[in-house]
């Protein structure tokens, strides 16, 4: 409301409308996420209750005589499992999501942004599947025990036993799936000879293996184990579809209900089928399998997704330049036909000569205006090390282009950070490695300025880079140096004001900095702008910008830790006075 | 598959298996199922496996992430020495514990999961891994910087105190620079 009043006093209404939109986006974005999750939980709750009640009808009267409420307790989570297994494949179809985002983006950027939280949703659905599986299995343990009991309690005046004997001759109209009363082989029979039992155990095992190898510790350290074990989901889905084929959930057939009303006839079980009574023997049949109806759609979409990824991986990618930066960073410049990107997006890369199955994500550091795409890869693990070697990192001679490895690129993915260009004054804050998407942004803004036919709205950029160590400076410093040079040539030195903050240093380095204090160029980065030490005083920074640009809207963009996001958010609110406004964009890079 | 430490995955798997084993056992005992004695054993075995597997081992390479509150478990498990350090012993222990679970439906899932964990531990043992406790490191006493080899034994030579304090009006004849400005106060 406070913002609304400020904006309405403004004279340039079209932009005012945009800013109302962008502030309400913040609130709405978080609310949308909550609402979405509430809707999902609501559907789960509804399905649970609905299917619980669906098995309390007369059709299942006799089934409940044997099983009690455990029948409903087993069927309700089964319905929820159908729903969640349908949902779990959807968030990982990233090409489909990318396509959806592209078509939604024209109408609603909030909705588009939600699609970036796909992995969080995937994990949430996975936990729900695990929970429902647990309930389902425990209920079936009781069901199984009760079925066994009713077969073993050989007593003709005991209804469950009588019910269990139905269908002994024709093997079609039985109620109790445990057909014999041989105690010893019960376990083996139910589990291995019965398709439902066997598939149940197999898919639960697959689920447990998938979950244990997806624990954060394993996932972060040994990605391959996680990735390969995760492919057990194929076994999971095949077993899931086959699980209902056995039709062991049985109820009275429709024809049987008409002639045999359980409410009236249940007490007369000793005379069923005998001439003179109006209670013939009840007939039972199993329910047809339903799961395939839920999951066939997403399974098809996922197969399409994998085909699209495969097709994209076959597209030719040519490495045009390889740059080894001293800070264990490898820069690859590539060309791919028909590749279009926007600022702040990322791609997945695969190198068949290193590993056929591994795809790794990297933020794009090139601008859309450039004719190539580039990524800066830090060498931290097996795959990146192998890529470094394959690109000739350890050799000093120049390599021929044909010796460079073949690469596949899938993407680009991620929400574009186009909002940057809608502000007159922009504050970009990047912490550590979070500066990578800003490389793309800075280059793009510069290109827009250079191409005179583009009327660039952005007039001033304040760039803050917080870094714990000097090593990571190298490649980005090169970029800033070249930008500095170009700006000086175009006489636009004031366009970009950047501040690099070194948040950690060693004593030995500190001595060197003190000595070099008077030098013209910074000892660390070689830039004219001096590196600062410690963390920025945001209060001062915001105040300085507010006084420099009275009456304008300043967009604040962050790529870094949540604590910093909170701090900046607070600063934006406290420094927004009549005149300057700071609008914090919680971009999900 | 890279340089994976199998023991880490085996640890997660066996912790999950212990929980499942115990849960199956609780269901079996609470529902008074046929063969509930196996279920009771399942509870005991499941709880034992959970306690044994809760403390994470120290990784061969890289930073180890502790589980919350695992220190007392680490101390207990460490007390058994080679019995708990060696992964062959663990593999056979898990294999032995899982067998009774196979006789009852409620515990069969725990049995199979524990069996798989036992196989992964066997793989870890074959690769030469072993359990290392994560104990808090005693900080080495703060060392003075390398450039200071030996602190000086004697104070530096100085003129006696009454001559040391530089008078403000005699700055040019002073023996050394004052680091901060001095005012006349005598």
Image (cartoon, rainbow, N blue to C red):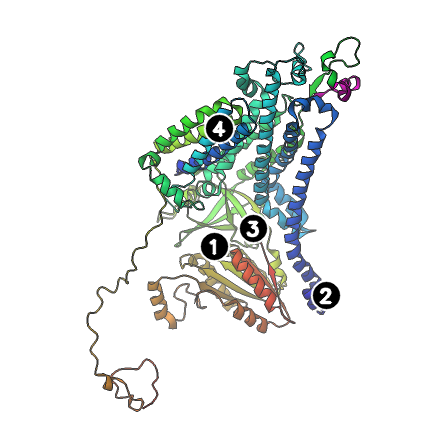
Local SS, label 2: helix
| Residue at screen point 59% across, 16% down | A152
Main SS of the magenta part reads helix
Q: Is residue A146 magenta?
A: no
Q: Is residue A234 left or right of residue A176?
A: left
Q: Mark 1 highlights which residue?
A: A433
Cα separation, mark 4 vs mark 1, equals 53 Å
Secondary structure of residue under mark 4: helix
Q: What chain does mark 1 sit on?
A: A
Marks 3 and 1, the one that precedes in the sequence = 3
Contact? badges 2 and 3 (CB < 8 Å): no
> Which numbered circle lies on residue A345?
3
Residue at point 59%, 60% (across, down): A448
- Judge by depth and name the residue closer to the eye, A277 or A566: A277
User: Which contiguous range is marked in magenta?
Assistant: A251-266
Specify whether A385 is left or right of A550: left
A501, above or below A434, in the image: below
Query: Along the line of sight, which residue is nearer the eye, A133 or A399?
Result: A133
**From the viewer's perspective, is the residue at label 3 or at label 4 nearer?**
4
Q: Which mark is residue A305?
A: none
Q: Secondary structure at mark 3?
A: loop
**Residue that numbered label 2 is attached to:** A13
Q: CA distance from mark 3 to mark 1?
A: 15 Å
User: Which label was assigned to residue B40?
Assistant: 4
Tell me what residue is drawn at x 55 percent, y 59 percent.
Answer: A565
Instruction: Read off the chain for label 4.
Output: B
């Amino acid at each position: 409301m406070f913002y609304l009043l400020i904006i309405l006093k403004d004279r340039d209404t079209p932009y005012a409308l945009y800013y109302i939109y962008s502030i309400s986006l913040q609130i709405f974005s978080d609310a949308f996420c909550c609402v979405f999750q509430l809707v999902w939980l609501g559907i789960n709750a509804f399905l649970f209750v609905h299917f619980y009640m669906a098995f309390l009808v007369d059709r299942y009267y006799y089934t409940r005589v044997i099983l009690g409420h455990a029948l409903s307790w087993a069927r309700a989570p089964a319905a929820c499992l159908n729903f969640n297994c349908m949902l779990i494949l959807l968030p990982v179809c990233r090409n489909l999501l990318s396509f959806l985002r592209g078509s939604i983006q024209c109408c609603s950027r909030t909705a588009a942004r939600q699609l970036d939280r796909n992995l969080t949703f995937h994990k949430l659905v996975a936990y729900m599947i695990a929970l429902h599986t647990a309930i389902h299995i425990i209920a079936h343990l009781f069901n199984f025990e009760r079925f066994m009991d009713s077969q073993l309690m050989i007593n003709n005046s005991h209804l469950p036993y009588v019910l269990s004997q139905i269908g002994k001759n024709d093997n079609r109209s039985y109620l109790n799936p445990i057909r014999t009363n041989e105690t010893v082989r019960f376990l083996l029979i139910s589990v291995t000879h019965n398709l439902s039992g066997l598939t149940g155990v197999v898919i639960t095992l697959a689920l447990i293996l998938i979950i244990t190898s997806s624990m954060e510790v394993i996932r972060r350290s040994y990605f391959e184990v996680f990735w390969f074990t995760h492919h057990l989901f194929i076994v999971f889905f095949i077993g899931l579809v086959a699980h209902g084929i056995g039709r062991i959930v049985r109820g009275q057939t429709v024809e049987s209900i008409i002639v045999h009303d359980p409410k009236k006839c249940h007490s007369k079980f000793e005379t069923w089928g005998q001439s003179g009574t109006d209670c013939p023997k009840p007939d039972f049949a199993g329910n047809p399998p339903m799961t395939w109806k839920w999951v066939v759609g997403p399974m098809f979409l996922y197969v399409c997704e994998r085909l699209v990824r495969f097709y994209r991986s076959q597209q030719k990618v040519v490495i045009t330049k390889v740059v080894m930066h001293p800070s264990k960073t490898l820069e690859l410049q590539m060309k791919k036909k028909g590749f279009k990107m926007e600022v702040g997006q990322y791609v997945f890369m695969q190198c068949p000569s290193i590993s056929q199955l591994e795809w790794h994500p990297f933020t794009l550091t090139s601008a859309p205006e450039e004719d190539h795409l580039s990524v800066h890869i830090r060498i931290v693990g097996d795959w990146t090390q192998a890529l470094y070697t394959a690109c000739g990192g350890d050799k000093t001679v120049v390599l021929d282009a044909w010796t460079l490895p073949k690469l596949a690129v899938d993407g680009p993915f991620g929400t574009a950070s186009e909002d940057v260009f809608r502000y007159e004054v922009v504050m970009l804050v990047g912490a550590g490695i979070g500066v990578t998407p800003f490389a793309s942004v800075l280059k793009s803004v510069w290109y827009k300025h250079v191409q005179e036919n583009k009327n660039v709205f952005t007039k001033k950029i304040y760039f803050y880079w917080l870094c714990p160590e000097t090593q990571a400076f190298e490649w980005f410093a090169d970029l800033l140096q070249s930008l500095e040079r170009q700006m000086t040539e175009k006489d636009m030195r004031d366009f970009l004001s950047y501040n690099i903050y070194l948040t950690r240093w060693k004593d030995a380095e500190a001595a060197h900095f003190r000595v070099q204090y008077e030098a013209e160029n910074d000892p660390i980065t070689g830039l004219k702008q001096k590196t600062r030490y410690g963390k920025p005083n945001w209060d001062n920074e915001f105040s300085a910008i507010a006084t420099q640009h009275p009456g304008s809207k300043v967009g604040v963009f962050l790529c870094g830790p949540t604590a910093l996001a909170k701090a900046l958010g607070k600063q934006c609110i406290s420094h927004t006075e009549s005149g300057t406004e700071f609008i914090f964009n919680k971009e999900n890079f | 598959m890279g340089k994976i430490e199998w023991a880490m995955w085996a640890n997660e798997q066996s912790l999950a298996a212990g929980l499942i084993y115990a849960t199956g056992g609780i269901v079996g005992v609470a529902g008074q199922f046929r063969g509930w004695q196996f279920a009771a054993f399942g509870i005991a075995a499941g709880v034992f496996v959970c306690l044994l597997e809760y403390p994470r081992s120290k990784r061969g390479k890289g930073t180890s992430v502790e589980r919350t509150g695992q220190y007392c478990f680490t101390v207990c498990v460490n007390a058994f020495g080679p019995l708990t350090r060696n992964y062959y012993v663990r593999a056979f222990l898990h294999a032995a514990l899982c067998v009774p679970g196979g006789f009852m439906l409620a515990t069969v899932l725990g049995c199979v999961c524990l069996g798989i964990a036992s196989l992964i531990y066997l793989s870890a043992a074959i690769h030469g891994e072993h359990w290392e406790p994560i104990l808090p490191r005693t900080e080495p006493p703060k060392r003075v910087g390398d450039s200071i080899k030996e602190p000086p034994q004697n104070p530096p030579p100085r003129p006696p105190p009454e001559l040391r304090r530089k008078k403000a009006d005699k700055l040019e004849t002073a023996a050394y620079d004052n680091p901060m400005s001095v005012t006349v106060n005598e």
